[in-house]
Image (cartoon, rainbow, N blue to C red):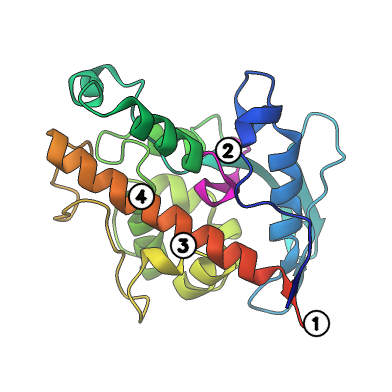
Amino acid sequence: MNQLPVIDTAFDVRSDAGGRDPDQHSPTLRRYHQLLWSKPLPSGALLTLDASRPGEYLHHRSDLGEFFLASDTIIHTFASWIRMADIIAQVDAEDRAAFHRIGRTIGGTIVFPGNRIDGKPTINGARGMHPRIRDRFDLTLECIRRHYEGAPSPLAETLLRYADFFRLFEDFRGYVDFFFLQDLVSDDYSAVEFFTPFDNFTTPALPGILAAYEHYRAQTVGFVQARNGRIADSLELPS
């Protein structure tokens, strides 16, 4: 098998962002998103993403609709969160750096609609602000799973505003497969595999003790490693 040399899953997207937010300023991350997600949808229709429009991250317009997509970091160390400071201080500096590094590879990012509707928060903004989500992607994915089922969740109102985007993938399985998220769901796609114990959004989103944080870190690192592997495998062609 010969792997196409277009995406390096070990690339740290902070390295070409000029010290700014890689989700907005890393040209490599933007190119990787364009390459990865410009592909057939479950319906067979092609989603093509344009990265050339000034002031826009990625854009698509066709009979499918018009979509303005933006990058979002989906793996968070919580190192900058004040309420997590005492726990983070107990983590070895090398482990903290390694966690940051893998979270800034392509496997630690995704795209969501980046346009505001009626002046309300985007998915990225809403999931960061909601106290029961706290930017956790596993919890966000559970909200997305429930969206496809028409079930309530902390992000239900926000996701409904972008229903046309989620409709592109037809169902939860289609969404998961499109974005290489299989390692975060059960084999039959009926449940999300959470990074920490979960009880219908009643358990705290932030780990409250060092042991819980270490478990969260191990689970998230494992997920990103597995997702990077799936991304790399998708780029292989028969020799």
- Which residue position holds label 2? 117
Q: Is residue 59 magenta?
A: no
Disc 2 + disc 4, Cβ < 8 Å:
no
Judge left or right: residue 184 versus residue 29: left
The one of 83 and 106 positioned closer to us in this rendering: 106
Amino acid residing under circle 4: Thr
2 or 3: mark nearer the eye = 3
Quarter placement of the N terminus: bottom right
Name the disc covering residue 111, or none.
none
Left or right of 175? Residue 136 is left
Q: Position of residue 21 (x, y in %)?
A: 60, 25
What label sits on residue 220 in the rendered view? 4
Q: Quadrant of residue 186?
A: bottom left
Asked which secondary structure carries label 4, the reply is: helix
* Magenta stretch, residue numbers: 104-116
Upstream in sequence: badge 1 or badge 2: 2
Q: Is residue 117 above or below residue 18?
A: below
Q: CA distance from mark 1 to mark 4?
A: 33 Å
Mark 1: which amino acid?
Ser
Q: Residue at x 27, y 57 (%)?
A: 194
Q: Nearer the viewer, residue 116 or 219?
A: 219
Question: Where does label 1 land, which residue?
Answer: 239
